[in-house]
Image (cartoon, rainbow, N blue to C red):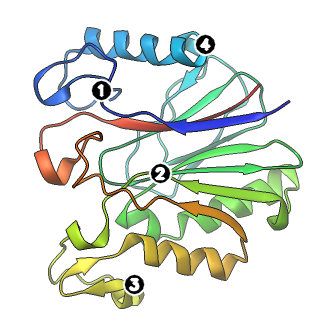
Amino acid sequence: MSVFYGFSDTKGGVSNRNYSSLNLGLHVNDDENLVIQNRKIFANKLGFKSENLVFMDQIHSDNICIIDKIPYPTPTCDAIITNLKNVVLCVMVADCMPVLLFDKSKQIISAVHLGRAGICANLLTKVIQKMIAKFECKIDDLKLIVGPHIQGKCYEIGNLNLEKFNKFKKDGNFYMNKALLSEINEIGLKDYTISEICTHCDKNYFSYRRDKITGRFCGYIYIK
């Protein structure tokens, strides 16, 4: 078995206007039929049917769901974990961090939605704790990949009080990557990659901050 992962972008779908063209989000007021078609196109590119994709109803929480069957009803959470083959875990974003995580030894995979709320809730730490408790993963066997997201230079939050995370603010901007890196170091995770691509600046990716009305791209990970 092998683990495969990656990130979609805006290209190759059938949506139009602000959602052009590979919008994978059903919750952003795009035509539902077009989004369903986009998901089929996306799944087909990966060699799957759309029924093999697991998307979340993301609510900026610290809820974590174990996917133990397929098809699986859309879970209301911001992190999903599975050890099943041919299940594509998907995290939708348009500025937040699409985080992918897997155990290189046991082949346990996870997709995590990390925005400001998730970082402040230490969601990544909780996901890793769940992987250790449920699947006996070891921290030294974990690999973390963070996809394109809004960089601090473009992420203005003004005077919003982030309490202990205020140290990752500068001139009213929040640097999520620095906050996450601090958590990674606290956890003791050694194998990680954090993208420097800014979704606000790069129009190959959807950005809520840039466009307001826009689609969602996704990070995906699966075992095959």
Q: CA separation, marks 3 and 2?
A: 21 Å
Q: Are marks 4 and 3 in contact (CB under 8 Å)?
A: no
Q: Quick one: SS at disc 3?
A: helix
Give the left or right position of residue 126, taking residue 7 as reference.
right
Which residue has dot 3 on it? 165
Asked if 77 appears above or below 83 in the picture, the reply is below
Q: CA separation, marks 4 and 3?
A: 40 Å
User: Which quadrant holds the C terminus?
Assistant: top right
User: Mark 3 or mark 2, which is nearer to you?
Assistant: 2
Give the left or right position of residue 207, taking residue 191 as reference.
left
Q: What residue type is disc 1 on?
A: Asn
**Residue 7 % position (x, y):** 48, 38
**Residue 135 % position (x, y):** 85, 49
Q: Are marks 3 and 2 in contact (CB under 8 Å)?
A: no
Q: What residue type is disc 2 on?
A: Gly
Q: Are marks 1 and 4 in contact (CB under 8 Å)?
A: no
- Pick whichever, 106 or 26, lies toward us: 106
- Pick whichever, 152 or 133, lies toward us: 152
Which residue has dot 4 on it? 48
Which residue has dot 2 on it? 147
**Residue 179 % position (x, y):** 45, 77
User: Mark 1 or mark 2, which is nearer to you?
Assistant: 2
Q: Quick one: SS at disc 1?
A: loop
> Badge 2: how crowded within 10 Å, few (<14), some, or many (20+)?
many
User: Which label's residue is closer to the chain start, 3 or 1?
Assistant: 1
Q: Report which quarter residue 192 is drawn in.
A: bottom right
Name the disc covering residue 23, or none: 1
Q: Report which quarter residue 175 is drawn in.
A: bottom left
Q: CA separation, marks 2 and 4?
A: 22 Å
Q: CA separation, marks 1 and 4?
A: 18 Å
User: Which residue: 71% across, 57% down?
Assistant: 143
Q: What residue type is disc 4 on?
A: Phe
